[in-house]
Amino acid sequence: MAKSLKSAAKAKDNDLFGAPEAKAKAQLKVAARSGGAEAGYTAADIEVLEGLEPVRRRPGMYIGGTDEKALHHLFAEVIDNSMDEALAGHATFIEVELSADGFLTVTDNGRGIPVDPHPKFPKKSALEVIMCTLHSGGKFDSKVYETSGGLHGVGVSVVNALSSRLEVEVARSQKLYRMSFERGHPKGKLEDLGKINNRRGTRIRFKPDTEIFGAKAAFKPQRLFKMARSKAYLFGGVEIRWKCASELLKGVEDVPAEDSFHFPGGLKDYLGAAIHADTLVHPDIFSGKSGRNGAHGACEWAVAWTADADGFLSSYCNTVPTPDGGTHESGLRGALLRGLKDHGERVGQGKRVAPVTSEDVMVGAASMLSVFVREPEFQGQTKDRLATAEAQRIVEQAVKDSFDHWLSGNPLQANKLLDFVIERADERLRRRAEKEISRKTAVKKLRLPGKLTDCTNTAAEGSELFIVEGDSAGGTAKHARDRKTQAILPLRGKILNVASAGKDKLTANAQLADLMQAIGCGTLAHYREEDLRYSRIIIMTDADVDGAHIASLLITFFYRQMPRLIDEGHLYLAVPPLYKLTHGDKSVYARDDAHKDALMKSEFHANAKVEVSRFKGLGEMNPQQLKETTMDPARRTLLKVVLLADDRDGTADSVERLMGTKAEARFAFISDRAEFASEELLDV
């Protein structure tokens, strides 16, 4: 059939375009209708976008899109300008205030934006030129700023273009000036408000335009709070003051109405806070600074190796986050690798350390890196990746020298670290050797859990593992499954809460051992994507409170022990029905009470006598019902478990608060939300 379709398509193409005489006739007909091929396309069709109109037409070119991340990028552009003043030695504090009306205000005590007439545009102040003209600013050479996060002179003008209203106040030379804008257009001239004492710097107050970001667009206090705090960590010489309207903090955890950040310890303090609960291979954080913000660049770093958690590397250039890495990260990796190899040679471990790569060094390394360079080169306006070749040399040279001294001065810690990294290299080489073995052969050698009913598919791709509660549900699922692609693993009741249990309990727990064995990919730093036995891990529990509790415990287990399983998109929740609604020959299934009420209105007549039966558990359903509602890929609903990339700290805090060892935190959470618990829910 596929061949016949291709033949038909080819014949059709020949009919339309193949014969020269037919092609000529078709062109003549089109020309006759249009008055010539060029008649519909003239100079009048050529648009010339002026001022900030290109930004409003294509915001994605300047801030990466119009989603929540892009919205908060506006704040990054404004605070980066204030940070540049601090890095240049002209500002000592920055104030960030989020108001109840949605306006965000950033104030610094720097030099203030120039307000005198611009030489190229004598009828406009420099402030107006900066706010309304792309590619204007004082950062194109090093006379005004030796290092800065801004490069192209588009940041604050983009914020202006994408704000429904923006107001600028400049305190300069003991005088105060003000100018207002709407959607990038000035609303009047620059105002001279007269003399002012004891104030200097720039204040920018703006509100994102709902025409660009949507009607519900609003800054998230938690996200702004973390962004502001991270800036203070990156430059110990600045104090950042935070203020947020109390009405915006209802239901928001861990964000105060007012706070102040000042971290003289810089990145070492930042990393210490990030890994406070992790077990370290060595007790001390390797940290240091080199150079200053000047012609030759500068860098600051902090690194610690964790024994029981995956590593990470957070990097910055001129205080701007670089989530996609770049040349400065390459410099750090190279310095750490060379330093450890040189130490291995010095202590007679040259042969053992020879196969070590930067991947082995970084697999458990929790790292922070900040580099300051003149005229940095980024990939894209959002500056996600640094491309400056000089940054690699600056970082590698500075870190390597300091790392050599640190290893020599701490021989016991250095040898522990060396052994840890060599173990990672040995494990990597072992995995590479095992990779050639097919999954089918490997499965025969594995001792799989006795209760696991495996699928016949020998490849991970397309295979699914359903984790169900209890043997009864497991029996039903086994009969409902597709034997080729769906495996079933029943668990006995509620599993161990890994967030509050110690390592010994986790190791000794038979149910979790069975689960880890069935999945096959290892945990934490030992996680191996290539050893994963199923492409989907599906938690299938009863559609009631107990089922939700078991699902929460399982998600907590995967979050704590296999976070990469979630990051790679392998974890799902099945959505079994809670009710079956029957009238005559018609039956429909409802997920919960709200869905039941909606179906009663949409699927049945108002006076129909509908029989409502409630499933007490998956084991009560017959295999056909379970298949058609929950397991059949063509008809089921799956919920994918994801971690929000922009709120990983908030996720970690929530898991610790709700699932951790502090019962009082859970009690406070429940008490705060007691008004939402209905009598019906309490009776379940």
Image (tube, grey):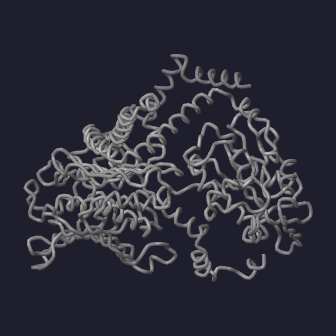
Provide residue 190's location: percent of width, then percent of height: 16, 70
Residue at left 88%, top 65%?
A: 582
In this view, the residue farthest toward the top is 20
Residue at left 42%, top 53%?
A: 65
In depth, the one of 498 and 106 nearer the eye is 498
Q: Is residue 131 above or below residue 39?
A: below
Q: Along the horizontal axis of the image, is 462 left or right of 220?
A: right
The total number of labels drawn is: 0
Provide residue 336's location: percent of width, then percent of height: 37, 40
Q: Quadrant of residue 486?
A: top right
Provide residue 5's location: percent of width, then percent of height: 69, 26
Residue 43 in sight in this render: no
Q: Is residue 504 above or below residue 41?
A: below
Q: Quadrant of the N terminus?
A: top right
Provide residue 499's location: percent of width, then percent of height: 61, 62
In depth, the one of 467 and 627 nearer the eye is 467
Q: Is residue 182 above or below residue 508?
A: below
Q: Quadrant of residue 212?
A: bottom left
Q: Quadrant of residue 161?
A: bottom left
In depth, the one of 565 and 48 nearer the eye is 565
In this view, the residue farthest toward the right is 584
Q: Along the horizontal axis of the image, is 117 left or right of 502?
A: left
Q: Along the horizontal axis of the image, is 254 left or right of 342?
A: right
